[in-house]
Image (cartoon, helix red, strand yellow):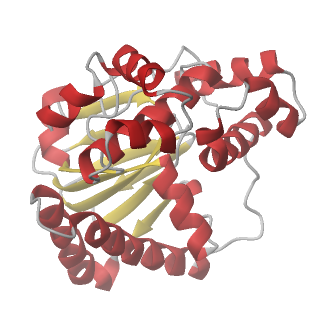
Amino acid sequence: MSKSFAVPVPVFKLYGETGAWPTPDLIHCESIPERSQLHGWEIKPHRHSDLVQLLYVQAGQATLKVEDEIHPIDCASLQVVPALSVHTFKFSEDIQGHVLSLAQPLAEQLGASLNSPVLSTAACYPIGSAQQYLDTLFSAITQEYSQHRPGRDPMLQSLITVLTIWLSRRSLERASPDALPLERGREHLQVFTRTLERHFREHLPIEHYAATLGISTAHLNALCRRLCGQSALQMINQRLLLEAKRDLVYTAMTINQVSDRLGFSEPAYFSRFFKRGTGQSPKQFRIQR
């Protein structure tokens, strides 16, 4: 890690935000100017513990730094920012483009279905002759994201699958056998999040996840706090809350059914858990949304 990142690096859900993931979607989409102008066209060094970002620069100039890789941008480019990667961006005031944020569960699902590590590997891809194709694809994603029409969720995932396939193909074209492996701690965190994704409904103790990794519970918690800004238990709870929000918004299941599906022993316990994490009861959250 470079000296400029030696101080503690904040962990954000989105740029400049430390609160909970702002939507029950597994996707967040906005323009680059929409967010960056609020911060003087410069995004300070930070990392995201549980989301992958795809930064598409269509026009204007930018300096993109992800870990120790710096990319001066003056033509259409797409930057992949994996979870846990420290990054900072500077933009010209005429910048145009999009920021697509994918919650880690969706990124893991896409990577597994395509058998590709493209979303877990930092890289900057010049667009070249494919700009019209990417412009059209991001325009479709933005339009679908902003409208709440029937089939919105599967349509968004289909469009993002297309984008991930495009990225995977570009990655294969420029693959290098000399790529360095991820640091050991980050590998542990990736295995933990993948295991959590498979078993979060089972309410397994932290000791189980640590044993799966072959490390102590204290070591797992230390890794989670250092790289994700929260304890292993908080990460487990956040994953349960995200799934609960999605069930409450996108399904007709009763609160009792949601509680049962998420592995809670009784609905009253689920309601207390949900209110403790969100400040609202499941019923209040559903009505508001």
Q: How many marks?
A: 0
Q: Is residue 156 above or below residue 49?
A: below
Q: Quadrant of residue 277?
A: top left
Q: Is residue 222 above or below residue 77?
A: above
Look at the image and tell me in which quarter the C terminus lies.
Answer: top left
Who's the residue at 20% across and 82% down the image? 132
Q: Quadrant of residue 109?
A: bottom right
- Residue farthest right in this picture: 214
Residue 286 vs residue 92, the one in the foreground: 286
Residue 227 vs residue 64, the one in the foreground: 227
Who's the residue at 52% across and 81% down the image? 169
Residue 110 appears left or right of 90 = right
Residue 4: % across, % down = 52, 23
Query: Does residue 202 appear anywhere in the picture?
Result: yes
Residue 270: % across, % down = 44, 25
Query: Does residue 76 appear anywhere in the picture?
Result: no
Q: Is residue 234 above or below residue 96?
A: above
Residue 216 appears left or right of 152 = right
Residue 271: % across, % down = 38, 22
Residue 166: % across, % down = 43, 79
Who's the residue at 42% across and 32% down the image? 241
Look at the image and tell me in which quarter the N terminus lies.
Answer: top right
Residue 131 appears left or right of 242 = left
Residue 106 vs residue 282, the one in the foreground: 282
